[in-house]
Image (cartoon, rainbow, N blue to C red):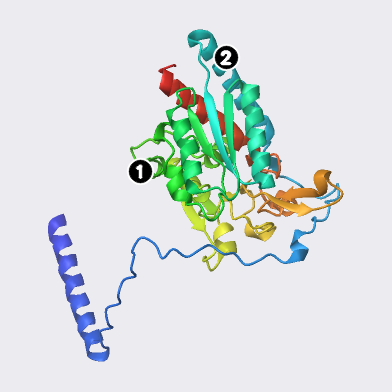
Amino acid sequence: MMRNVAVAWKNSKKNACSSAFQGIRKTTTVPPILKSPPSLLSLDLPDVWFPIASHQLQPPPKSSSNERQGAVVIDGKFIAQEIRSLIASQVSRMKECIGKIPGLAVVLVGQRRDSQTYVRNKMKACEEAGIKSLITQLPCDCNEAAVLDALSTFNQDPSIHGILVQLPLPQHLDEEKILNAVNLEKDVDGFHPLNMGNLAMRGREPLFIPCTPKGCIELLLRSGVEIVGKNAVVIGRSNIVGLPTSLLLQRHHATVSIVHAFTPNPEQVTSEADIVVTASGVPNLVRGNWLKPGAVVVDVGTFPVEDPNFDHGYRLIGDVCYEEALQVASAVTPVPGGVGPMTIAMLLSNTLDAAKRAYHFT
């Protein structure tokens, strides 16, 4: 009986569609077949966001004590320190058991102040965890061969288990070629195409997960945020943060949307999200009216703004207008003190994992 009903429905739908098509054919002409673009993979258009007005970079007004600030501030420093303490204890146990310690090598090209600061913080974190660290510094105008030679040396050094190329590189260097030269087993940044590909495929496991996305998910999980079945929006789609973060959220069974510079209605898309991870690099892009009440917000952005009232003459802000987010969200990561410390902790974690794998240590 069920089969007869199904056949009857199919036939009636077929007849209806046929009649409708005939009517259309009489009144319209068939449109020409459009040619596909040269590459079906990508049009390779750069993400260029509209600049933020200067007044939006001013410090937001301080909230009075009687205003409600219901959001929990997710303390990335505290969570990262817990992870780093655990890593240090495991490094100590490895040294006691087999007489070996993990090793991390960094290649730094140029004199960018922010890159130098990041590398200095990573070296300090290695020292505190008992991890060996080496650095090769090259001038900004060095040629590609010099960078590749440094990587080759670290690739062949059995005491080095993780290699990190500090980004961004000067424009005259081929970033893709240089990152691909890092030994897959030492790619603690997780940027090698095989690591990224395995991250994207169900049933596959990458050797390493990129540090900042890994830190974002750790923050959510350790803060008790439910990811499964939630609507998540990732703002930005870089290979370093946006893309791998969206893949990780999918692995945790979130329904993921990606907002980028060509998204026509970013506020609307973002306002429907239970979880927002933003890595656009645009200061104060995400305002309070972008957020769904009760959303969880992870701010990856870091942007220095000149301010003589702060140490070093500047303060750091993120992609999110922090004071406004506090009034709407249920939980927010601060800048600084949110994702940044977690990125370093995940780097140490990946380096430890690489050493365990190399020494067959559990």
Q: Which residue is drawn at 68% across and 33% down?
A: 77
Give the labeled residue for mark 1. Answer: 201
- Residue type of the residue flagged with mark 1: Met
| Label 2, residues with CA under 10 Å away: few <14, some 14-19, many ≥20 | some
| Label 1, residues with CA under 10 Å away: few <14, some 14-19, many ≥20 | few
Which of discs 2 and 1 lies nearer the camera? The answer is 2
Position of residue 174 measured from the top left corner of the image (x, y, whole percent): 47, 52
Whether label 2 touches label 1, CB < 8 Å = no
Q: Quadrant of residue 57?
A: bottom right
Give the labeled residue for mark 2. Answer: 92
Position of residue 214 measured from the top left corner of the image (x, y, whole percent): 52, 38
Position of residue 252 measured from the top left corner of the image (x, y, whole percent): 45, 40
Q: Is disc 1 placed on a helix, strand or loop? A: loop
Q: Which residue is drawn at 40% across and 36% down?
A: 206
State whether residue 338 appears in this view: no
State which quarter of the image contains the C terminus.
Answer: top left
